[in-house]
Every structure is written in structure tokens, then in C-alpha cells.
Image (cartoon, rainbow, N blue to C red):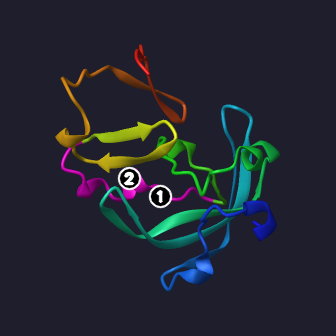
Amino acid sequence: MPDDMLGSVPYYSPAGSSTSKLQQGKTFNVTYGDGDNASGIVYTDKVVIGGVTAAELPVEAATSVSASILKNGGYSGLLGLGLPKGNQCQPERCEIFTEKEKSAFPAKVFCADLKNGAPGTFDFGYIDSSKYQGNIVYTVSWTHEYTYCLSLDLHGD
């Protein structure tokens, strides 16, 4: 993406990484449920997410995004945690984080500690008891095409 479109938000720079490798001929083009879209080229690189290090993980570097993504601002990237079937790499799909590093997870769980107006965190393979109060309520999840689905009834702030 051109620097004038990115503003002050930090973003992935393959040139700034000694482990980045361009995947010749690999591209991506994705449209999200809200109609936003992004497209670009694919690198592999060393990535650390939630304490798990993935060597040679595919990184999709956007060269074009919809205007509404830029207008909303504050995004430095997106982490796809959907099902492998939904991967948008072409001409063949890329291995995604949760399938590439599944042996690093002690349990089949990932937790999101999301905050309104503040940075949040993700934990993979475990539940950090310091990040919640009370009891965890589990819900049934299911898959639909490319995504995980669950039904939530949220209360509070």
C-alpha cells in the first residue's frame, strides 16, 4: 500500500524483515461479510501470535483495500482464524496459522480478550485465568462454509 494511504498505523513491511520471502505468483483477493475487500501478494515470514512462533507462515500483504477499510483507520492488518477451506490464496491455498501450528496448542481453544478503545490479546491453546472473572460459559459452535459460528447473548458495557 502506498504510504500516503496508511497514515501513522504500523503495518507489515517485508523489506524490514530478514526472514521474509516473496511467494512468486501467489496472490489473494478476499471480500468480507460487510462488503469490504482486500487484495495483494503473498510472502512467508516468521510470525509470533499469542506466544506461538510460526516459521514461514504465509503473510498476505495488501496492495489494494476498499475505501471503507481506509476510512475506518486504525487497522494494521487482519488475522484470519477461519477454516482452511476459506483461504483466499491463489493459485493454490496457503496453510493458515491455526493448521500450521496446531501441534503447539495444548488444547483446541483460542481466546480473545477484546477491549473497547484499547488493545486486546489472543491466546492460543490455553485459557488465561487472569483475564476473566467468574465462570466461563461454553457454547456450542458450528461451521458454515468458511467460518466458525456461535450464538451469543451479550449483556453489560
Q: Which residue is mark 2?
A: 99
Q: Is residue 96 magenta?
A: yes
x and y percent of residue 15 in the render? 61, 82
Q: Residue at x 18, y 39 (%)?
A: 129
Q: Is residue 15 left or right of residue 125?
A: right
Label 1: state its secondary structure: loop
Q: Which residues are magenta?
A: 92-107
Q: Which residue is mark 1?
A: 95
Q: Nearer the viewer, residue 12 or 71?
A: 71
x and y percent of residue 26 in the render? 66, 66
Gap between marks 2 and 1 measured at Cα: 7 Å
**Residues packed near mark 2 inside 10 Å, few (<14), some (14 to 19) or many (20 plus):** few
Q: Is residue 60 left or right of residue 31?
A: left
Tell which residue pokes out farthest to the bottom in this image.
18
- Residue 114 to residue 25: above or below: above
Q: Nearer the viewer, residue 94 or 14?
A: 14
- Residue 152 to residue 104: above or below: above
- Residue 35 to residue 59: above or below: above
Residues at badges 2 and 1 in contact (C-beta under 8 Å)? yes
Three-letter amino acid code of the residue under disc 2: Glu
Q: Is residue 19 magenta?
A: no
x and y percent of residue 89 in the render? 62, 56
Three-letter amino acid code of the residue under disc 1: Glu
Residue 134 appearing in the image: yes
Label 2: state its secondary structure: helix
Q: Residue at x 75, y 66 (%)?
A: 1
